[in-house]
Image: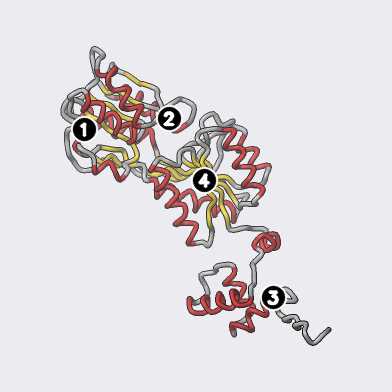
């Protein structure tokens, strides 16, 4: 080697090891490993010192190779069908809160209620070796999808909607009971003509709402039944109301599939020169933050999206830890949050939670 040729740096000429980082940071090799795996067991000062050494030595953590060694990736796939709906923002926040406490992260996908798009996401998540899936099945999902995921050895917790034959892991809210609470309240206010707006029969969450609607009407001996299918958007609620209110007899109250439909319905009533809560009662479902800020404030069935997300994530982690354990269904209690849009204010009506 000539005198003008620089001598290769010994560190740069070979791969940096965990032992190199440990020596540079003045800690043990096991401490470096814990830092790389984002363990909460490492003190913050030590973590920062190790991270400075990692950066100084130019070490790149091969997470894929580590996953192959450990058989887990500390990742969870999350598939929802309408990421633009604020409900799912709250639910995903609950999922991430529960996962973060256990050192997990999530990959979020939006199926747009397309089974084909959903299938592509699931296959891609399989390629990335996620430890499990939280799935809100797209409308029209084949019932055997859960069997397919089982054959992939991919734990799956269904959220809010479900397909296939039980037993299966599921986390959600008792939609049927929530609708019953709403109709009980409307009947107590003197309403006898109560319509239901929104939804399609293609998934379990709508079927449960409609079942609750029909059962509650029968329980109160009400002959009037008007159920309008539609998308579950503001526009759908807005466009349904004029024709509905032109019917004879017209309903005196409308119960909506979700808060978005209810917001649209209230706007439609205002365009007709009618006052929501006075000329027609309106009740939504989900109790989004916007519900309390409306004019009038929207009465809504609280379905607890953040709590549903937390429960779903915890259930998924239990299933990952115990793949052969008994399947669980966690069903949270609904709460009717009464505000001005139904024409009366009172304390919330509640029902107990159930876990099976």
Residue 199 x %, y %: 41, 27
* View extreme (top): residue: 248
User: Which mark is drawn over residue 206?
Assistant: 2
User: Which residue has dot 4 on it?
Assistant: 328
Asked whether the residues under the numbered discs 3 and 1 touch, taking CB atoms below 8 Å apart as contact, a structural biologist would say no
Q: Closer to the N terminus: mark 3 or mark 1? A: 3
Q: How far apart are marks 2 and 4 (CA)?
A: 22 Å
Residue 59 x %, y %: 64, 72
Q: Which residue is drawn at 58% across and 72% down?
A: 34
- Which-is-in-front pick, marks 3 and 4? 3
Asked whether the residues under the numbered discs 3 and 4 touch, taking CB atoms below 8 Å apart as contact, a structural biologist would say no
Check the picture and name the quadrant holding the N terminus: bottom right
Q: How far apart are marks 3 and 2 (CA)?
A: 55 Å
Q: Residue at x 23, y 14 (%)?
A: 249
Q: Closer to the N terminus: mark 2 or mark 4? A: 2
Q: Closer to the N terminus: mark 3 or mark 4? A: 3
User: Which residue has dot 3 on it?
Assistant: 17
Q: Distance between the residues labelled 3 and 1?
A: 66 Å
Q: In which quarter of the image is residue 117?
A: top right
User: Which residue has dot 1 on it?
Assistant: 342
Asked whether the residues under the numbered discs 2 and 4 touch, taking CB atoms below 8 Å apart as contact, a structural biologist would say no
Task: Establish if 322 lies above or below 265.
Answer: below
Horizontal placement of 345 versus 10: left or right?
Answer: left
């Amino acid at each position: 080697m000539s005198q003008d040729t620089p001598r290769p740096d010994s560190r740069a000429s070979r791969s940096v090891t965990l032992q190199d980082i440990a020596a540079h940071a003045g800690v043990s090799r096991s401490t470096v490993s814990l830092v790389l795996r984002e363990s909460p067991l490492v003190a913050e000062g030590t973590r920062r010192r190790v991270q400075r050494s990692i950066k100084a030595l130019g070490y790149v953590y091969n997470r894929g190779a580590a996953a192959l060694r450990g058989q887990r990736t500390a990742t969870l796939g999350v598939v929802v069908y309408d990421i633009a709906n604020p409900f799912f923002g709250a639910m995903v926040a609950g999922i991430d809160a529960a996962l973060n406490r256990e050192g997990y992260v999530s990959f979020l996908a939006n199926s747009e209620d397309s089974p084909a798009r959903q299938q592509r996401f699931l296959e891609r998540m399989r390629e990335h070796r996620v430890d499990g899936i939280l799935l809100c099945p797209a409308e029209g999902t084949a019932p055997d999808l859960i069997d397919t995921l089982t054959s992939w050895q991919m734990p799956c917790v269904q959220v809010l909607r479900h397909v296939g034959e039980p037993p299966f892991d599921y986390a959600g809210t008792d939609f049927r009971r929530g609708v019953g609470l709403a109709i009980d309240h409307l009947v107590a206010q003197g309403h006898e003509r109560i319509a239901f707006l929104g939804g399609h029969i293609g998934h379990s969450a709508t079927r449960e709402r409609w079942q609750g609607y029909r059962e509650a009407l029968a329980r109160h001996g009400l002959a009037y039944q008007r159920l309008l299918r539609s998308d579950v958007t503001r526009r759908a609620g807005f466009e349904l109301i004029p024709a509905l209110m032109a019917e004879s007899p017209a309903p005196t109250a409308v119960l909506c599939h979700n808060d978005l439909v209810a917001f649209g319905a209230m706007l439609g009533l205002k365009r007709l020169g009618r006052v929501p809560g006075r000329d027609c009662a309106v009740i939504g479902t989900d109790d989004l933050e916007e519900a309390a800020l409306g004019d009038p404030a929207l009465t809504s069935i609280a379905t607890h999206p953040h709590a549903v997300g937390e429960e779903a994530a915890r259930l998924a982690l239990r299933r990952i830890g115990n793949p052969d354990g008994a399947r669980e269904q966690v069903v949270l209690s609904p709460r009717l949050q009464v505000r001005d849009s139904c024409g009366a204010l009172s304390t919330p009506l509640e029902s107990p939670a159930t876990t099976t």
